[in-house]
Image: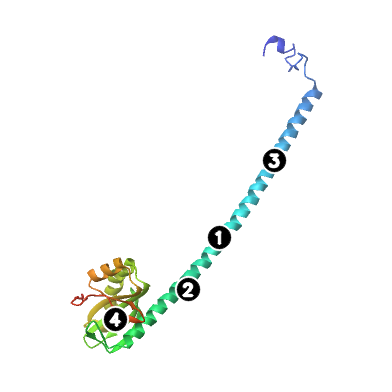
Amino acid sequence: MSKKDQNDANEPLSEYGEPISFHQVWKMFQETDKQFKETDKQFKETDKKFKETDKLLTEKFQETDRKIDRLAKLYGGVSENSKDVAEEFFRRGLEAKSSLFGIEYTEVDHLARTSKKLQGEYDIVLHNGEYTIIIEVKYKLHPDDVTDFINRKLPNFKPLFREYADKRIIGAVAGMSVPSDSYELAENQGLLVLTQSGENMSVMNPEGFRWKEI
């Protein structure tokens, strides 16, 4: 500040070069305090709006989550019902027969067991004195279903059901709908493949196909 901007007592000067009075300083403080209060009020109003918006968003997300849960349960129920329909279709078809792809059987079962280390559920199991045919049933057979059956479910069968340890195990998959990639994967892995043909069950494997035993 230059000499012309201050008086001898080094007091603040007004814009006219006169010392600022206590009243003016007090007024300035009051105006500044008023501005702070207004700013604080604006912050509080903004914060309130943020909280209201956050509450609305939270409610919307919760409602969306509830809808997703309902859809998941609905889809799960439809999926389970479809699988039940497929299992019933193939079970009845197999119960009406006594052989599958030239292999005779006398019993048609559903097996499930849990041990300390393993658990497994097998949709349809066909028995005779020598062979056991294990069939995984899906409404629509996907390649992942085939892979899981080959890599997990089939290897777990004998450890879970030791009474079948001396049996010749054959794997099979069945689907009301069997896409070509699922069929090719299953056939290449030596599985029998069953599907729906009109009102009847049919075997998709060609004549002369050789299955794999485990």
Q: Are marks 3 and 4 in contact (CB under 8 Å)?
A: no
Residue at left offset 30%, top offset 67%:
180
Real-space CA distance between mark 3 and mark 4, rounded to the nearest whole angstrom = 73 Å
Q: Residue furthest top?
A: 3
Residue carrying label 2: 77
Residue 10 x, y percent position in the rendering: 72, 14
Query: Label 4 is placed on what type of residue?
Result: Phe
Residue carrying label 4: 161
Query: Label 2 is placed on what type of residue?
Result: Gly
The mark closer to the camera, 4 or 1, is 1
Residue at left offset 42%, top offset 75%:
82
Residue situated in front as seen by the camera: 177 or 76: 177
Of labels 3 and 4, earlier in sequence is 3
Q: Residue furthest front?
A: 198
Residue 133 x, y percent position in the rendering: 27, 81
Residue at left offset 26%, top offset 84%:
163
Q: Are marks 2 and 4 in contact (CB under 8 Å)?
A: no
In the picture, the quarter occupied by the C terminus is bottom left
Of labels 4 and 1, earlier in sequence is 1
Of labels 2 and 4, earlier in sequence is 2
Query: Label 3 is placed on what type of residue?
Result: Gln
